Image: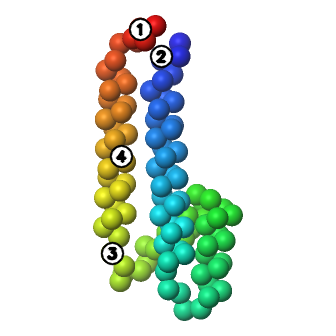
Amino acid sequence: MIANALPAMLLLILIGVLCFVFWLIMLIDSITRKFKDGTEKIIWVLVNILLGLLGSLIYYFVVFKNDGKKSIKWFWWILLILVSLMIVAVAVLLSTPAGYGN
């Protein structure tokens, strides 16, 4: 019974890791970004910290995505690597026999 739930548990863990990495990238960007005034930076850092993933999504669509000057290639490479690892981990788990480990 636990072996049947293992792929779903691993998938949830990997989704959680992806969400944490996304939140961390948005938090670091809001801390290091040069805003027009200091209060805007404080507000965005607090939004990211207090609202967590929701705050990071708001920050991404309001500030990060609309900034044409900033190159975010590293952000997409990190996501690509994490998603690839997630796919490989799920494929390995699905290919192992259900009775393995008992």
Badge 1, how many Cα within 10 Å: few under 14, some, many 20+? few
Which of marks 2 and 1 precedes in the sequence? 2
Q: Around disc 4, counting alpha carbons within 10 Å, would you say few (fewer than 14), some (14 to 19), or many (20 or more)?
A: some
Q: Earlier in the sequence, mark 3 or mark 2?
A: 2
Q: CA distance from mark 1 to mark 2?
A: 8 Å
Which residue corresponds to mark 1? Answer: 99
Sequence-wise first label, 2 or 4: 2
Q: Secondary structure at mark 4?
A: helix
Residue 83 numbered tag:
4
- What's the distance in space between the residues labelled 2 and 4, CA to CA? 23 Å
Q: Residue 95: give x, y in percent of width and height.
A: 31, 20
Residue drawn at (65%, 78%) of the image: 43
Amino acid carrying label 4: it is Val
Relative to 90, does residue 63 appear above or below in the rendering?
Answer: below
32 vs 38, left or right, is left
Q: Secondary structure at mark 2?
A: helix
- In which quadrant of the rendered view does residue 54 lie? bottom right
Residue receiving disc 2: 3
Q: Which residue is mark 3?
A: 71
Q: Is residue 67 placed above or below 4 in the rendered structure?
A: below
